[in-house]
Image (cartoon, coloured by chain):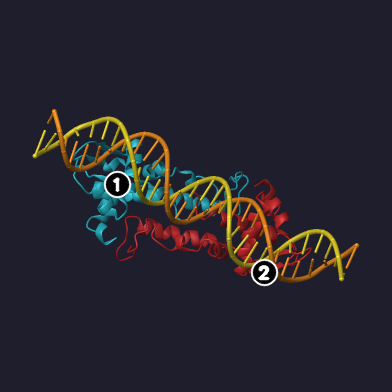
Chain colours: A red, B cyan, C yellow, D orange
Amino acid sequence: MTVIFSKKAEIAIKAMLFLATKEPEACYDAGTISKELQIPKMFAAKIMQELVYSGLLNSKKGKSGGFFLGKNGHDIKLEEIVKAIDGLDAFTSCVFGFPQCSDEHPCPVHDKWSVIKGDLLNMLSMTISEMKEKTIDKIDSL
Amino acid sequence: MTVIFSKKAEIAIKAMLFLATKEPEACYDAGTISKELQIPKMFAAKIMQELVYSGLLNSKKGKSGGFFLGKNGHDIKLEEIVKAIDGLDAFTSCVFGFPQCSDEHPCPVHDKWSVIKGDLLNMLSMTISEMKEKTIDKIDSL
DNA sequence: TATTAATTAGACAAAAAAATCTGATTTAAA
DNA sequence: TTTAAATCAGATTTTTTTGTCTAATTAATA
């Protein structure tokens, strides 16, 4: 059981965080990133591709190619990364999956979950740059 | 992507909530419960068995057998149900899965996530009886 | 221009989670 | 005592998620 987002989303966030700590246009290839994150190269490559597809990363093909941030880290929120990989359903729907749950027809934890959902979205509003500031020199120890 | 607990845990909660709205020792069989929750009978049966195994439900075998709460609804917290089915790792570990994440070596969202984890556990401290009070006559519309 | 090293797309495989089946046992009631 | 209807345990199947492979394309550089 993953916590709040899938393993792929977890990796996506870590990969983007890694790139955010580097020079803006510097290219890092899937192999380098996979070593950094200690995951299989082809799995990293696949996830990076999804991020390119959604515009969060850019890529350079061919020899000495690789990946780099698609826009300034100040403009990339965690939420966008999660949205690109998992979607945001988890953060907008009823925690029990009751389709009719709403303010008018609340499930038993509707109010509490509504507050928590807000806090979760607030947490996900952090940008990659902000994360970087909090992470400098720590990524290795994590 | 499930939100905070698995689909099985969702079903477990709904099934226990259903039983909580009935007479304490009244038996309801897997078929009845599966119809109520609109899920396959055998899937319901399997989940009920897990709940029996963990002591949250009791069962009566044989003809006109079925399931009923293993203890008073006032003494059954949501948390126990989730724990029985999914475990509680999700509510105690780092949201990014960083194994070393701690107060001393916080990940970038450690503080925010710590608060949210507390709120989640608080939400799960609700008892089945409390949920019932908030749900009476609503379970059909949900 | 040939070689090498990278992304890309899509098919494929493996593992995990969700769902189903089967056969044994239990028990109420005909 | 026989039958019908239920739980139970464990194996099996299906679906989803995770992870791998291969062939095509791209581009730097020798």
Q: Nearer the viewer, residue B124 or A19?
A: A19
Residue at (52% x, 61% y) in the render: A86
Q: Amino acid at mark 2?
A: Asn
Residue type at mark 1?
Met
Question: Does residue B6 appear anywhere in the picture?
Answer: no
In this rendered view, identify the residue nearer to me: A135 or C26. Answer: C26
Subunit of mark 1?
B
Crowd band around label 1 with a 10 angstrom C-alpha radius: few (<14), some (14–19), many (20+): many
Disc 1 vs disc 2: which is toward the camera?
1
Q: Residue D9 or A14: which is nearer the viewer?
A: D9
Q: Chain of mark 2?
A: A
Q: Is residue B118 left or right of residue A138?
A: left
Separation (CA) of disc 1 from disc 2: 49 Å
Residue at point 22% right, 36% down? B62
Q: Please tell me the numbered disc located at residue B16.
A: 1
Q: Which mark is residue A72?
A: 2
Q: Are marks 1 and 2 in contact (CB under 8 Å)?
A: no
Question: Is label 2 in a helix, a strand or a loop?
Answer: loop
Please report the residue visible at 39 percent of the width from the left and 44 percent of the height from the top.
B79
Query: Which mark identifies residue A33?
Result: none
On the image, the x and y values in percent for residue C18 come to 41, 51
Residue A133: x percent and y percent?
Answer: 67, 58
Number of numbered markers: 2
Please state the horizontal and vertical placement of residue A67, each as a whole percent of the image: 70, 64
Horizontal placement of B79 versus A131: left or right? left
State the SS at label 1.
helix
Circle 2 Cα neighbour tier, 10 Å, few/some/many (<14 / 14–19 / ≥20): few
The vertical placement of B71 against A74, above or below, is above
Q: Quadrant of residue B103?
A: top right
